[in-house]
Image (spheres, rainbow, N blue to C red):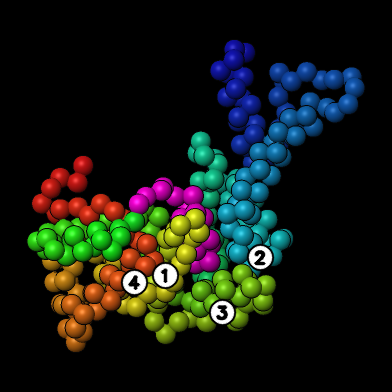
Amino acid sequence: MNLIELQNDFQRILLDSERKGADWVNESIHGLTSLDRLGIYYNAYRIRLIDVLLDTFEHTAIYLGDDWFHQLAAAYVQSHQSTYTNIGLYGREFPNFLAEQLADDKEVSELALMDWKLRRAFDGADSGVMTDDELQDLASADSISIQLQPVPTLSITKQYFNTLDIWHAINQDQAPPPVERLPQPIDILIWRKAYSPHFRSLAEIESAAIACILSGDSLEAIGGTLEHDFPNVDVATEFGVMLRRWLDDEIIGTAPRNAGLDAH
């Protein structure tokens, strides 16, 4: 067996659903058998990835409890191999996995998605944020074709249950409230301000405006969309209030783009 064959066989043993031996592992007259020695690596691979999931999905793990979370995490590890050079990115599909496994408990996958996005906001790319002076410069120009640049850690997630209340209760070491479906789904904005991840719920018009920004729409296009979708709202005034809050929250980057230019 050459080195490549040896490496492939060792990987196959690690990833297989059942621990198996290998005839190329020499038996020792002292200590563990070859199967038990391979088992150290077999188990360590799984334990390490479960530890990563525990760290990333902390609130989800507390909500489910140790036994249930470990059972689900072990099943995820077996069905989702680690393909990332950055182990912190392992678990990207875990919220979807929980949605499939716990189809009658959708708040669990919503909680996991919130955990995931908050962690990704924490270690996301750095960027500058727009200042008041830069906003004044933008306002004094012909800005209808300008695109606002969101910070790279910004994202929106939709929740259909009182998952936000559950997250807050867990974060405060309190018993989570009973699960309830919301009368209307809400959008949660997640981003990093300074060195800390933040989140807050969004009003419908603000969610629509931020969705336009994330899509790369110009200010003119955003205004047109909001006027069409919210005909009973003073869009100009409301957008000014939102823009002030976005500056305070530090969710707008320093480099507004001209919609007429190539964004490359």
Mark 2 falls on what kind of element? helix
Q: Secondary structure at mark 3?
A: loop
Asked whether, in this view, residue 80 is left or right of residue 249, the answer is right
**Mark 3 or 1, which is nearer the eye?**
1
- Residue named by callout 2: 62
Image marks 4 and 2: residues in contact by CB distance under 8 Å:
no
Q: Measure how far apart labels 4 and 2 are at the Cα level.
A: 33 Å
- Residue that carries the numbered disc 4 in the rendered image: 245
In the image, is residue 124 part of the stretch drawn in magenta? yes
Reply above or below: 39 against 53. above
The residue that label 3 is drawn on is 179
User: Which residue is nearer to you in this view: 122 or 139?
Assistant: 139
Label 3 crowd bin: few (<14), some (14–19), many (20+), radius 10 Å: some
Marks counted in the figure total 4
Tag 1, which secondary structure?
strand
Between disc 1 and disc 4, the foreground one is 4
